[in-house]
Amino acid sequence: MQKILIRFNVQIHFVLFLTILNICSFVVHGQFTVPIDQKESALTQKALQGRLPDSVRVELVWNLGKYQMLNKPGKYKINLDSAMLYFKYSLKLVDSLKMKANFRYECMCRIGEVYFLRKEIRSGKSIYMRVIREYQRLGDKKREARTWFRLGIKLKNGEPLDPEIPYYLQKTITMYNELKQWKEVGDVMMEKGIYNKENIGNIAGNLDSAEYQLSQALKLYRRAGYKDHNLSLTFYNLSVIYRNKGKLDQSLANSIASIRSANSIGDTTTLGIVPYYGQLGLIYTDLGLYKKSAENYRKAIALSLRNRDVGIAMDITYNYLNELVRSLISAGKTKEAVVMSNSIMKVYPPADPLQYGIAAEIRGRCYEALMQYREAERSFLSMIHFYRKSGSLETLGYKVLSSFYLKQKKYALARQALKDQYNYLPINTMAFSTLIDDELSYFKIDSAEGKLNSAINHYKRYKTLSDSAFNITKSNQLARLSTQYEIEKKENDIIILKKDAQLEREKTAKAYFTRNLTLVAIAALIFFFILLYKSYLANRRKAAALSMLVKEKDQFLEQKEWLMKEVHHRVKNNLQIVMGLLQSQSAYIKNKEALRAIRNSENRMHSVALIHQKLYQSDSPGFINMPEYIDELINYLRDSFDLGNRIHFKKDIKFDNLNVNQALPLGLIINEAITNAIKYAFAGKVFGSVVVSFLPIEYGLYCLIVKDDGPGLPSGLDPLNIKSMGMNLMKGLSKQIGGKLSIEDAQGTSVCVKFKIEHLTDNSSNG
């Protein structure tokens, strides 16, 4: 109790401390740093001044959590822990103020999001499923659908290869279709398309399905008259797909549409628009229009450097700096490429393996253009090393290395590098221009090595692909799109200049206002510190008064916990004494049936004794770690029946801690099922295997299965009607936990118990 009070007190003061820091930031810079946008900034100011209700107080704490979770560079564990602290505090605040249930569920979802970012996937799913079940109970279809969607998106961010993501997204689409919310259906279709695009080669999806889903999202947005960030993002992802498929006319049209859409809603300065300009630069590079590509790369770099999220911005900056250097060198501006890259990397040196790899690639390109080939090769090999260390871009690195070796007429090394690039990425994910270059490279290598038939085949494929791309570049539509975009861009530049002039005038007026406001803010801060200090002294007196009571309570709790462990220890010892007596008695019994009954009793007692042993060894009273318990029970039975390696046991346990009220009956059922398999399925020293699985099958419903690959049940035998102690015991124990027992004959004998879990996790595991 004392620890909880102290933690609660620390949380309150920490929140107040950050609030003071934000007021200071407002005084110095004229804006708050915690909120994500201007709307949240205004709400936070009013909350600090006490003009809004309790819901806004919760929103303020949410903003602090979001700042730690999203705005801090790198998302380090300490930042995520801080975010978790704020969100759990907001949950306590909601409960103490007895606010609407929706506030509580939103707090829970934010806690789940932090779990996903911390890679604690099971905990994150559990939180979201609890919220979904509550909305199902309330019949709130809209919020249920939104929570399914959030679960899929947050899980995609935390564990993109999780096989349940497509199910969550499709579930959302079905519900939104039933609700006829077309804009929301478009949002989910867009995310599903992006998911398929990003996971190509890892899942059973492809670019065609991603193209279809994004096109459907675009139709739904137009149907709903929707114009927002997601519309721009849909155009952008369609452009990426069309470029990878070699449809440069459609890629260019969608790339221009993404920028036009972003400009129409004023989204021209955020980090999100940077890839739009970068994508347009890549298309112009494929078309050989290096001047236009360099112009767009410069725009992307300038916008990324302007962003406050330094970690993400610098990854993007290095990527497009690499492309800018390539365009400048291709345009014969090597000196400008060297000066540009050196100036940026000097101010923003590489900070991680990915950035070191890109920096090495940039240096290699510059050395190669300057004909310093030894330094270029050293840089390119360093590039491969860092790309491999970062776990990304290694495929493109081998492509660069192959091109370098080909120019140096090192054909064997060039061929090996070309081959290596496909070890890390499937061919159907390569950009169209990359495939054209690869076919031409193979043609040159085969020609140089005298492999004429192979060279001719590669040249034919090269001509087929390049002719297609060439025809696209010659089309009137392409020229018309490019010209129209240039006109719009100049008009937008004029509008931006006018806005900049207006902003300068407003900034001057704001400076005078800030100066006057500073004096008032300083006086308010002094008053605030006095109140805070008085609150600190009052809390300190209360803490001292409660300290003795809490200390006595902690002592009583420790004594109770010790006594409970002692009881379990003694019960376990008593059971072992009884087992020892039975073992001694069995030495004098000649009747096989009696001896078998005694042996079965020993095994049953051991399964119960093992439960009590786990209880007095556990730090979570009342809960049993099922994987450890089942493993020790199997080892005991293997030794008891002297199986050696005759029977192979396999385990598939997807559950950790289980309430002892259910763990004890399940342990006895496992004991009976394995014992029957040993005695009847593998009698006569027959070799075989037994599989023990404990898996979820529905929400809150689990299944325990013990299956052997023996001869199976005799024909016509109904095992549930067998009158034996073991069968009666399994049926009685199944009813005791509210479960259903079934025994089936399927390439062996399968014993299955389906039941509902009383408590998913113990309190200690929830932290």
Image: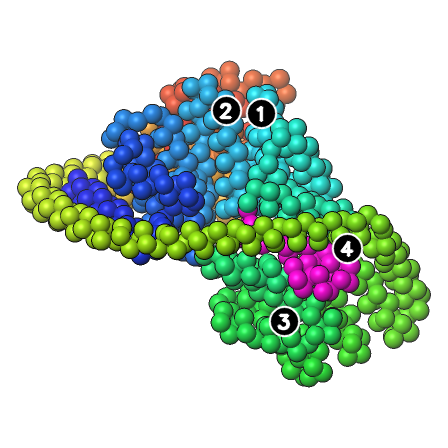
Which is the main secondary structure of the residues drawn in magenta?
helix
Residue at 65%, 35% (x, y): give it. Answer: 217
Q: Nearer the viewer, mark 1 or mark 3?
A: 1
* Above or below, comparing residue 686 to residue 412 in the picture: above
Q: CA distance from mark 3 to mark 2?
A: 49 Å
Q: Which residue is disc 2 drawn over?
A: 142
Q: CA distance from mark 4 to mark 1?
A: 37 Å
Residue 33 pos. (x, y %): 36, 51
| Amino acid type assigned to the residue bearing label 1 in the image | Gln
Q: Name the residue nearer the viewer: 83 or 122.
A: 83
Q: Which residues are magenta?
A: 267-296
Q: Are marks 3 and 4 in contact (CB under 8 Å)?
A: no
Residue at 59%, 36% (x, y): give it. Answer: 227
Residue 87 pos. (x, y %): 34, 41
Q: Are marks 1 and 3 in contact (CB under 8 Å)?
A: no
Mark 2 or 4 closer to N-term? 2
Q: Which residue is disc 4 drawn over?
A: 432
Give the quarter of the figure containing the N terminus.
Answer: top left
Q: Are marks 2 and 4 in contact (CB under 8 Å)?
A: no
The answer, for residue 433, to whether it is visible in the render is: yes
| Amino acid type assigned to the residue bearing label 4 in the image | Phe
Q: Which residue is disc 1 drawn over?
A: 181
Q: Are marks 1 and 2 in contact (CB under 8 Å)?
A: yes
Q: CA distance from mark 1 to mark 2?
A: 9 Å
Mark 1 or 2 closer to N-term? 2
Mark 4 or 1 closer to N-term? 1
The answer, for residue 185, to whether it is visible in the render is: no
* Above or below, comparing residue 203 to residue 28 in the picture: above
Q: Which mark is residue 361?
A: 3
Q: CA distance from mark 3 to mark 4?
A: 22 Å
